[in-house]
Amino acid sequence: MNPKFQAPRGTLDYTPPGSLALRRLQELAAEVFSRYGFLPLETPIFESTDLFTRSIGEETDIVSKEMYTFPDKKGRSLTLRPEGTASAVRAYLERGLEDTGFSRFWYFGPMFRYERPQAGRTRQFFQLGVEAFADAGPASDAEVIECFWRLCEALGLEGLQVKLNSVGCAACRGAYTAALKERLRGREGDVCEQCRTRLEKNPLRILDCKVAADQELYRDLPKLVDSLCEACAAHFAGVRGNLELLGVAYVLEPRLVRGLDYYTRTAFEITSGALGAQDAVGGGGRYDLLVEQFGGRPTPAVGFAAGVERLLMVAEKTAASLPAPYAGTAYIAALGERVGRRALELARDIRTEKLSCLLDLGPGGLGKKLKAASRLACGWALILGDAELDSGNIAVKDLASGEQKLVPLEGLVTYLKERRGHPCRTS
Ligand code: AMP
């Protein structure tokens, strides 16, 4: 095969069964999020470029290198969203959600970043996440982290770690970055080029540098958590205490600053040992200034975003495998022209009872059709030929056990319903 077209570099296709795992993850996430009162929010996939440059930060990797930005036909600069929080804040303000009392939202959708593709890093990827507005207290940070953790638990993921830090507020961070600069004065020549720029424009971000020599140099730098102001320190202690109360284990990670500028106070990540270099499944934190920065009333907020592909990668490595896509589905093997109408009616009746079936009215004999049903790992094969039609009984084969029974056509749906979800139970 030499197909004429290929997907753009750094993009994925979700084909069965992976596409099913993606949908199941979305359903599971929606279910876990609803327990916390998060409601679905859908925002556009493109936004005006300013929205991202002003919130994420000009000096961040995302804004400086990774955005898919293009002019529309009227010359307006638009960008494919690289993350979900900026859009959520915009929608919160623009749609007057402040005044509705709805303050908790979740999203699940594609994000775009022009990065060098590698394992766990693509140019289009899915993120799921939550945003909780209007609650300044440390319980809300802990709830958001707990929610992320419970989702991982519900997925059966293992070997994960919650990493926690506080990046303080504008006041304590200012003092800290001044101290950082002071400590590194005269060493500017020893750090990587990017860190030289960071030292000038956004010193905190040097802590996130992945260059080994730089990391070595930064190892003994003072910790931001040791310079928190009283209010930020109290908040951080509150978050830690609440996580302990909720039974969510964490480790303190003094160098964790995250790749976006809008965070204040709490910053966290969940990482997995199963992922290699790109080990963050997701992360988030508090962004108490962003709503105001976007023109709203001062409104504290906290949220997280997780990479769906990474969640699925960890699930594949550590969780029990997903059931086959057609487990529990009945495969109607219709044999001969005469049975077509009855087979179609049967399919309707099965589906009316919220069971699923595949209808095979095509050419071919029983052997071929049973083979197709087995290949798809269906739960049942329903064999309907002239003899069955005349006798009023249909042959029902449990494809897991191989057992076959004759069931009256009239009672077939009830028979399947009673065994819903138990395709192996034939008694
Ligand atoms: P961020 O918005 O940068 O905090 O990213 C949150 C999560 O999204 C990360 O921990 C990853 O799981 C995921 N993620 C970010 N960038 C990519 C990418 N290029 N490809 C795949 N997943 C990504």
Image: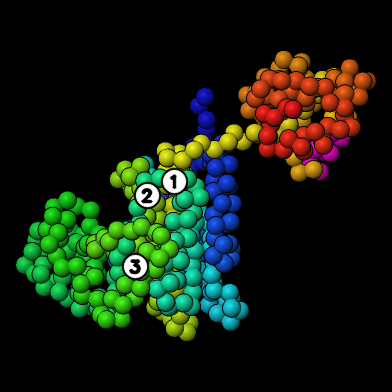
Look at the numbered disc 2 and say if its residue's Cβ is closer than 8 Å to ligand 1. Answer: no
Kindly tell me whether residue 246 is visible in this rendering: yes
Q: CA distance from mark 2 to mark 1?
A: 7 Å
Q: Residue at x 23, y 53 (%)?
A: 210
Q: Residue at x 52, y 32 (%)?
A: 4
Element carrying mark 2: strand
Q: Quadrant of the C terminus?
A: top right
Image quarter for residue 83? bottom left
The reply to whether dot 2 and dot 1 touch (C-beta < 8 Å) is: yes
398 relative position to 249: left or right: right
* Residue 240 circle label: 3
Q: CA distance from mark 1 to mark 3?
A: 23 Å
The percent position of residue 49, horizontal first and vertical second, equals: 44, 67
181 relative position to 399: left or right: left
Q: CA distance from mark 3 to mark 2?
A: 18 Å
Q: Foreground residue, 308 or 356?
A: 356
Q: Foreground residue, 203 or 307?
A: 307
Question: Quick one: label 1, few (<14), some, or many (20+) residues within 10 Å?
Answer: many
Ligand 1 shows up in which quadrant of the image? bottom left
Image quarter for residue 265? bottom left
Mark 3 vs mark 2: in front: 3
Give the residue pinned by disc 1: 157
Element carrying mark 1: loop
Q: Say which label, 3 or 2, has the lower sequence index.
A: 2
Q: Is 362 in the magenta?
A: no
Q: Amino acid at mark 1?
A: Leu
| Magenta span | 345-352
The percent position of residue 343, horizontal first and vertical second, equals: 84, 29
Q: Foreground residue, 167 or 195?
A: 167
Q: Amino acid at mark 2?
A: Leu
Q: Say which label, 1 or 3, has the lower sequence index.
A: 1
